[in-house]
Amino acid sequence: MEKKSRMKIGLFGGTFNPIHIGHLRAAEELREILQLEKIYFIPASVPPLKDLKNIASPSHRLRMVEIAIEENPFFQSSDVELKREGPSYTIDTLRFFSSKFPEFELCFILGSELFSEIDSWKEYNKLFELTHFAVITRPGFSKNLLPSLPLALKDDFIYHSDEHNLIVYLHKTSKTLALVQIEGIQVSSTQIRDLIYKNKSIKYLVPKEVERYIFDHNLYKKEAPQ
Ligand code: ATP
């Protein structure tokens, strides 16, 4: 009898400073393409590799995530990285989720620009023992991931399959690395902070409840965005 593959949950980490419709739409498209049971949005407390200026407090960023995903039953938020002392490392988050949900496969979601730096992450070699990866690409971005794989990792992957919006590589641990082409929406948190700083509208770039939250709490007004 063919072994039934285990259900997958997606883990979508980010600064979410603030969350925007690009994040939401990407998660929704990935959920459908990869048939994920749920996606956890996981705001990072102190992003180890990001500039720390003009960042809203962890509790504001978490609250905006909660508000943004409220009406989607497939989306959840997690404060695991905010509760942990010190910087957020993906390896620690993966260990947390794999012991919390031993019956599920994990699928870590990230943009291609982040994936190309993965060899600078803490214990990066161990990541592939714990999770599958889904790397988001958008139209116009390269569909071929192998050239941008960190050198140290190139020999660990072999090509597996190519469907129209999904190219899959297999890691030696048998976890997959899927390059997922989504339609997406071209917007960034930097753009939103920049608009707010210049007193311009952010309408339709974030859910309207998030827009209200930003203005009620006077976020991103004071400092020029980085
Ligand atoms: P910033 O502009 O402050 O760098 P950002 O908009 O890239 O922020 P992050 O919170 O850093 O947002 O992103 C979290 C994850 O979401 C990253 O993996 C990033 O690649 C991805 N991402 C960001 N914007 C989009 C978008 N418009 N479409 C798809 N994925 C996105």
Image (cartoon, helix red, strand yellow):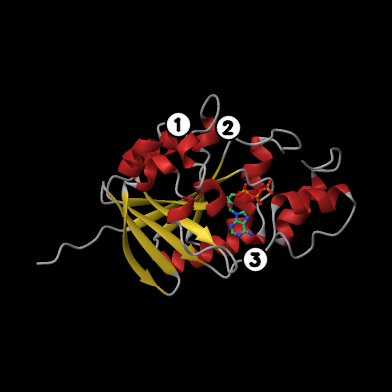
Q: Separation of disc 3 and disc 2 at Cα?
A: 26 Å
In this view of the protein, can residue 26 be seen by the observer?
yes
Disc 2 packing (10 Å; few <14; some 14–19; many ≥20)? few
Location of the N terminus by quadrant is bottom left
Which residue shows up at 76% across the image and 37% down it? 54
Seen in the picture, residue 199 relative to 27 is either above or below; the reply is: above
Disc 1 packing (10 Å; few <14; some 14–19; many ≥20)? few
Depth check: give the residue in front, 176 or 141.
141
Identify the residue position indicated by label 1 in the image: 122
Q: Separation of disc 3 and disc 1 at Cα?
A: 30 Å
Q: Tell which residue pokes out farthest to the right in this image.
A: 199
| Image coordinates for residue 181, horizontal then vertical, percent | 50, 67
Type of amino acid under label 3: Ile
Q: Tell which residue pokes out farthest to the bottom in this image.
A: 164
Seen in the picture, residue 143 relative to 11 is either above or below; the reply is: below
| Image coordinates for residue 28, horizontal then vertical, percent | 52, 65
Type of amino acid under label 1: Lys
Identify the residue position indicated by label 2 in the image: 48
